[in-house]
Amino acid sequence: MYKRIRELREDKDYNQQTVAEILSISQSTYSRYESGHLDIPSEILIALSKLYNVSVDYILELKD
């Protein structure tokens, strides 16, 4: 899942700071989500799925 959110971010040419601002969180918190050092809350997963126009299942690697 963590690799997938990084790939989605890079595909949109966003940096971590940009995504963090969209999600209203700090860049360091987002970085910890992306590195797997912090579990991603469900509300953030939903926000990411809307941002990237993909399903939560896709982010969680339950679907390709």
Image: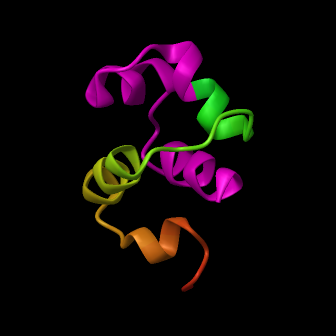
Q: Quadrant of the C terminus?
A: bottom right
> Dividing the picture into quarters, in which one does residue 1 lie?
bottom right
Point 50% across, 26% down: residue: 15
Magenta range is: 1-30
Establish if 32 lies above or below 1. Answer: above
Q: Position of residue 21 (x, y in %)?
A: 32, 20
The correct choice, above or below, for 39 with respect to 8 in the image is above
Q: Residue at x 58, y 82 (%)?
A: 62
Foreground residue among 24 and 54: 24
Percent position (x, y) of residue 7? Answer: 60, 53
Among the 4 quarters of the image, the one containing residue 39: top right
Say above or below: 30 vs 35. Answer: above
Q: In the image, is residue 28 part of the stretch drawn in magenta?
A: yes
> Is 35 part of what is drawn in magenta?
no
Q: Is residue 36 left or right of residue 39?
A: right
In the rendering, at what x and y percent does residue 34 appear? 64, 38
Colouring:
rainbow
Above-or-below relation of 16 to 52? above
Extreme-bottom residue of the structure: 63
Most common secondary structure along the magenta stretch: helix
What residue sits 56% from the left and 68% below the top? 60
Going by the image, does 57 lie left or right of 52? Answer: right
Q: How many marks?
A: 0
Q: Residue at x 51, y 54 (%)?
A: 8
